[in-house]
Amino acid sequence: MPMKQTDLSLYNNAAYHPGGSLVKRILWFYVNAFLFKTSLIPSSRLKVYLLRLFGAIVGKGVVIKPCVNIKYPWLLQIGDHSWIGEEVWIDNLVQVRIGNHVCLSQGALLLTGSHNYRDPAFGLITGSIILEDGVWICAKAIVTQGITAGSHSVLSAGSIATKNLDSCVIYQGNPATKIKLIPL
């Protein structure tokens, strides 16, 4: 039985380009591999400097721990006093905006891309991620493409956000569901 053809105009795989020149992308590949994804360079200052050099917008007081993987810094914005924990992977094929006082705990994963399983070519689907001020993405939690996490929301350890997270709410599970309001 033949598969139904999908209208690929709904997806942006044919038009996708990560931005930056080929040389810039190659340079970032090596900088990321040797200075970010290693535990040998613990300095946040150097990492913040390099992110800015490659086009990221990074606020003051940002901490970037060892073994962080960032796909494209020119598609990244990080607010003041935010914390990027060990082994965080920001797979930003499109824009990721991280607000002020945000915590991405160890092993958190921000995924801005996926694939259309109905398309025989598994066409690329992308969506920006926005983490508003005060958000906490706990250890090993995953935020998928197109998600906005409202101010002071919490995605608990190992949970997967497949829908927007409301402000001042703790979410847990796969898919993440509301479990508790946070009084502010």
Image (spheres, helix red, strand yellow):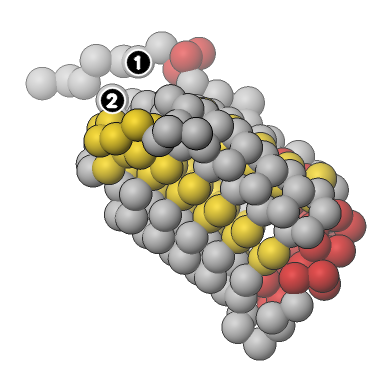
Q: Residue 55 at what x, y percent from top left?
A: 84, 48
Toward the left, the furthest residue is: 1
In the image: residue 23, left or right of residue 173: right
Which residue type does callout 1 highlight? Thr
Mark nearer the N terminus (2 vs 1): 1
Q: Residues within 10 Å of mark 1 (few under 14, many from 20)?
A: few
Instruction: Please say if the residues under marks 2 and 1 sit with CB atoms less than 8 Å apart.
Output: yes
Name the secondary structure under disc 2. loop
Q: Residue 171 at what x, y percent from top left?
A: 32, 38
Kindly identify which residue carries mark 1: 6
Picture quadrant of residue 108: bottom left
In the image: residue 20, left or right of residue 87: right
Q: Residues within 10 Å of mark 2 (few under 14, many from 20)?
A: few
Q: Which mark is residue 90?
A: none
Name the secondary structure under disc 1. loop
Q: Is residue 76 visible?
A: no
Taking 119 as reference, is 56 above or below it? below
Picture quadrant of residue 98: top right
Q: Which mark is residue 118?
A: 2
Question: Going 62% across and 80% down the picture, which residue do you hit?
Answer: 38
